C-alpha cells in the first residue's frame, strides 16, 4: 500500500509485522473510527499506533513509501449498477471456519449464533450475532479486511 491509497473521508488499518497502524482521515465519521479500532484490536499487534490525519509519524510515512497526495472525496468508488449486494455467512459450527455466500437473502436469513458480511460494492458491513463466538467475530474482521 502507498500513501496515494489514503482518503481523508476514510479510516485505514495497516498491519506490518508486530505493528498495527490506525489512520483516521479528518473527515471520517465515528462509525468508521470505531470499526477501524475494532479491526486493529482483532489483529492483536504488539505495538499499536493511532494517528489523526495531519499528525502522522515519519515511521508511518516511511511504511507507505513516503508522503504523497491522496484522495479527499466521500465516495471514491461509484456504485456499479450491475452489482447485487452479496451476503456471506461466516461460522465454525462444523469444527472449522468457513465462509459461504447466502443466495436470495433477507434479514431472516441471519442466525444469531453466527457472523455475516454484506458486500455492497463500495462498503463492507459486518453483523455479529449475539451468540457468535470470538473465533467467528475475528474471522469476520479478517475477511472484511
Image: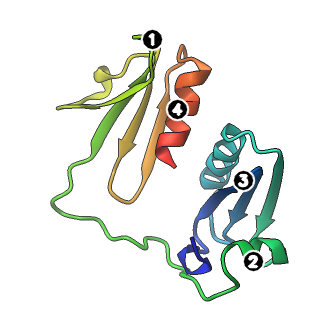
Is 110 rendered above or below residue 78? above
- N-terminal of the pair, mark 2 or mark 3, is 3
Residue ID for mark 4: 139
Label 3: state its secondary structure. Answer: loop
Q: CA distance from mark 4 to mark 2?
A: 29 Å
Q: Residue at x 61, y 88 (%)?
A: 69
Residue ID for mark 2: 62
Q: CA distance from mark 2 to mark 3?
A: 14 Å
| In-front residue for pair 65/41 | 65
Whole-percent x, y for residue 36 in the image: 64, 51
Q: Are marks 4 and 1 in contact (CB under 8 Å)?
A: no
Residue ID for mark 1: 95
Q: Mark 1 packing: few (<14 Cα in 10 Å), some, or many (20+)?
A: few
- N-terminal of the pair, mark 4 or mark 2, is 2
The image quadrant that residue 90 belongs to is top left
Q: CA distance from mark 4 to mark 1?
A: 14 Å
| In-front residue for pair 10/42 | 42
**Which image quadrant: the N terminus?**
bottom right
Label 1: state its secondary structure. Answer: loop
- The coloring applied to the image is rainbow
Q: Left of 88 or right of it: where is 134?
A: right
Amino acid at each position: 500500500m502507498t500513501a496515494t491509497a489514503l482518503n481523508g473521508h476514510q479510516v485505514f488499518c495497516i498491519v506490518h509485522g508486530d505493528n498495527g497502524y490506525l489512520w483516521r482521515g479528518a473527515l471520517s465519521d465515528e462509525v468508521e473510527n470505531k470499526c477501524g479500532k475494532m479491526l486493529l484490536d482483532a489483529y492483536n499487534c504488539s505495538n499499536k499506533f493511532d494517528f489523526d490525519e495531519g499528525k502522522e509519524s515519519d515511521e508511518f510515512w516511511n511504511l507507505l513509501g513516503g508522503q504523497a497526495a491522496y484522495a479527499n472525496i466521500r465516495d471514491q468508488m461509484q456504485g456499479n449498477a450491475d452489482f447485487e449486494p452479496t451476503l456471506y455467512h461466516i461460522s465454525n459450527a462444523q469444527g472449522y471456519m468457513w465462509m459461504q455466500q447466502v443466495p436470495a437473502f433477507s434479514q431472516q436469513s441471519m442466525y444469531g449464533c453466527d457472523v455475516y458480511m454484506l458486500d455492497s460494492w463500495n462498503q463492507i458491513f459486518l453483523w455479529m450475532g449475539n451468540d457468535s463466538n470470538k473465533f467467528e467475530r475475528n474471522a469476520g474482521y479478517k475477511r472484511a479486511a
